Amino acid sequence: KYDSFDGISQAGNNYTTPRDYAKLARHALTSATFDAVVRTTTTQQKAANVNRTYYWDNTNKLLGSYKGAIGIKTGTGTAAGPCLVFAAQRGKRTVVGVILNDPVNRYPDAVKMLDWAFGSKAPVKLRQLPPSAQKD
């Protein structure tokens, strides 16, 4: 249940589960547009109605670091803490995972979960975000 479009509730009425996030992510990945957006590490877009260009950096450190990483969602909420909804694809298999309230190890933990799911283990050096990237 969400009472705001971005999931950050002023009234504290948002709630979900990791399973709900995973189901939503798996469904969203069926959209080619969504899939393309969450895989993008950086983009710049010119505003249609003003002379301004916007720059965005994807804060998902798995992108470009973990083989087959798709991305999906990073963020920090008051109750949920630092979160990560992630996915990776190898061959025809796509794995989706969710980590909530992990202020220190969300990316290393995601790597461990993906390695377990794919039955492989390879050293991963996480992508460093540019200084201009938003901190989530």
Image (spheres, rainbow, N blue to C red):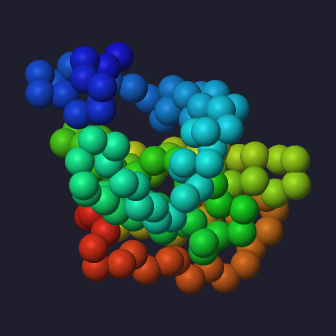
In this rendering, the count of numbered labels is 0
The answer to whether residue 87 of the structure is visible from this angle is yes
Residue 53, compared with residue 5, is above or below; it is below
Residue 83, compared with residue 134, is above or below; it is above
Residue 12, compared with residue 120, is above or below; it is above
What residue do we see at 83% from left, 47% from top? 93
Position of 51 compared to 48: left or right?
left
Percent x, y for residue 31?
65, 32
Residue at the extreme left of the image, as rendered: 11
Rendered image quadrant of residue 133: bottom left
The answer to whether residue 116 of the structure is visible from this angle is no
Percent x, y for residue 62?
55, 66
Of the pair 46 and 124, the residue shown nearer to us? 46
What residue do we see at 63% from left, 44% from top? 35
Rendered image quadrant of residue 54: bottom left
Percent x, y for residue 84?
45, 51
What residue do we see at 55% from left, 28% from top? 24
Residue at the extreme right of the image, as rendered: 91
Position of 61 compared to 31: left or right?
left
Of the pair 117 and 27, the residue shown nearer to us? 27
Quarter placement of the C terminus: bottom left
Percent x, y for residue 125?
56, 83
Of the pair 56 and 15, the residue shown nearer to us? 56
What residue do we see at 27% from left, 41% from top? 49
Position of 88 compared to 97: left or right?
right
Quarter placement of the N terminus: top left
